[in-house]
Image (spheres, coloured by chain):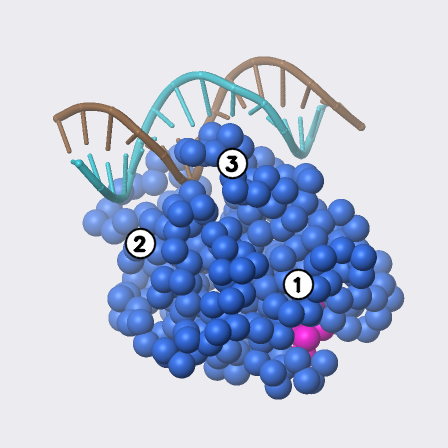
Chain colours: A blue, B cyan, C brown
DNA sequence: CGCTTTTGACCAGCGC
DNA sequence: GCGCTGGTCAAAAGCG
């Protein structure tokens, strides 16, 4: 673990490029200690070199172990509170780190379904009954995007259901929910206090349906379309419609570290990376970031496969 | 008319 | 227990 954590590329990347704004608010399960790391906690003051973050970074290099756990396009996974693996994720490398990176839910067997149905029923009720358990949360994934608009077009349709002022920030946080009836995916959007040009988006849950916005074919070549079609079935942040990149510059690392990306195969990851390189204008600094960061983050063999 | 956004209120969790 | 904060609800308003 320390070997990985001590990876200078990782530290450098975190400290120099995304000092305090890289958000990986990845709630795991009823063990809410990660959940407690809210945006504002992480943003600005949170030491991202802390183990949870670095575990995620580590998880980025554990892709092969995740590839086998392809996320089915079925109801969003929930936390299996009965699963010892879901509880008290040890700060050990490999699978445990991956689990702490909000992927444990993806790896849960089908037995979760019943629980998750109950959970969703409860969620749909106005007043969820409070049981012995703490409120369950979907796996979350946050990333930061350089954008002038708050609500990034990610190919899904969202309905805003709330807005709250954020502590220590002049920018409000907006709450969105996927408009698809059976889909409980939510996302939160807020502007980075330390860098207002950055928009922090947190996705919670997993889409149970393909993206309603079908990207036009032959944009960016086969790599792009492959990545899109695959990603469209999964987490929203994976897919980036053409117009998305026209207006926004997403921090590359976030895509590459997306747990859902891990849920696919390396080819898909490479496709997404390829997509970004295709779509990111070479005139901006993002290209430089892209190039350097991706190399830092991704195992070298993955980049070679491109 | 249907859908989305706005916004104040309410509730739960957490720390003191 | 109390206050703070995050998250959600739901009525009203806005929009196409």
In magenta, the rendered stretch is: A267-272
Circle 1 packing at 10 Å, graded few (<14), some (14-19), many (20+), is some
Q: Quadrant of residue A84?
A: bottom left
Residue at screen point 52% across, 73% down: A9
Say if mark 3 contacts mark 2, CB within 8 Å: no
Mark closer to the observer (3, 1)? 1
Closer to the chain start, of discs 3 and 2, is 2
Label 3 resides on the chain identified as A
Closer to the chain start, of discs 3 and 1, is 3
Q: As rendered, which of A26 and A199 lies closer to the eye?
A: A199
Q: Is residue B13 above or below residue A206?
A: above
On-image quarter of the N terminus of chain A: bottom left
Which residue is tagged 1? A289
In the rendered image, residues at marks 3 and 2 fall on the same chain: yes
Circle 3 packing at 10 Å, graded few (<14), some (14-19), many (20+), is many
Mark closer to the observer (2, 1)? 1
Q: As rendered, which of A154 and A232 lies closer to the eye?
A: A154
Label 1 resides on the chain identified as A
Residue at screen point 68% across, 84% down: A304
Quote the CA–CA distance across marks 2 and 1.
Answer: 33 Å
* Image location (x, y in percent) of residue A50: 36, 62
Q: Quadrant of residue A214?
A: bottom right
In the drawing, what numbered circle is on residue A32? 2
Is residue A41 left or right of B5 when viewed as pictured? left
Which residue is tagged 3? A173
* Image location (x, y in percent) of residue A47: 39, 55
Q: Is residue A124 visible?
A: yes
Q: Is residue A131 above or below residue A6?
A: above
Quote the CA–CA distance across marks 3 and 2.
Answer: 21 Å
């Amino acid at each position: 673990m320390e070997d990985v954590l001590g990876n200078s590329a990782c530290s450098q990347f975190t400290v120099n490029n995304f000092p305090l704004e890289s958000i990986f608010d990845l709630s795991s399960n009823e063990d809410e200690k990660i959940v407690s790391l809210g945006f504002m906690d992480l943003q600005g003051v949170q030491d991202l070199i802390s183990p949870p973050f670095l575990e995620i970074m580590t998880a980025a290099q554990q892709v092969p172990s995740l590839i086998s756990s392809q996320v089915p396009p079925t109801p969003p996974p929930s936390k299996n509170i009965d699963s010892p693996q879901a509880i008290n994720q040890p700060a050990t490398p490999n699978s445990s780190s991956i689990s702490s990176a909000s992927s444990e839910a993806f790896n849960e067997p089908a037995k979760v379904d019943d629980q998750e149905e109950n959970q969703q029923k409860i969620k749909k009720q106005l007043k969820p009954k409070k049981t012995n358990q703490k409120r369950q949360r979907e796996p979350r994934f946050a990333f930061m995007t350089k954008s002038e608009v708050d609500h990034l077009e990610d190919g899904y349709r969202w309905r805003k259901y709330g807005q709250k002022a954020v502590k220590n920030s002049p920018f409000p946080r907006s709450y969105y929910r996927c408009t698809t009836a059976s889909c409980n995916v939510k996302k939160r959007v807020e502007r980075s206090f330390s860098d207002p040009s950055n928009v922090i988006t947190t996705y919670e849950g997993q889409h149970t349906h393909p993206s309603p916005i079908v990207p036009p074919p032959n944009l960016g070549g086969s790599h792009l379309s492959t990545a899109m079609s695959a990603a469209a079935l999964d987490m929203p942040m994976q897919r980036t419609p053409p117009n998305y990149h026209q207006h926004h510059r997403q921090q590359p690392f976030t895509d590459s570290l997306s747990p859902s990306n891990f849920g696919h195969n390396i080819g898909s990851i490479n496709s997404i990376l390829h997509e970004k390189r295709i779509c990111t204008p070479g005139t901006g600094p993002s290209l430089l970031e892209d190039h350097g960061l991706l190399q830092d983050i991704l195992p070298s063999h993955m980049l070679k496969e491109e």
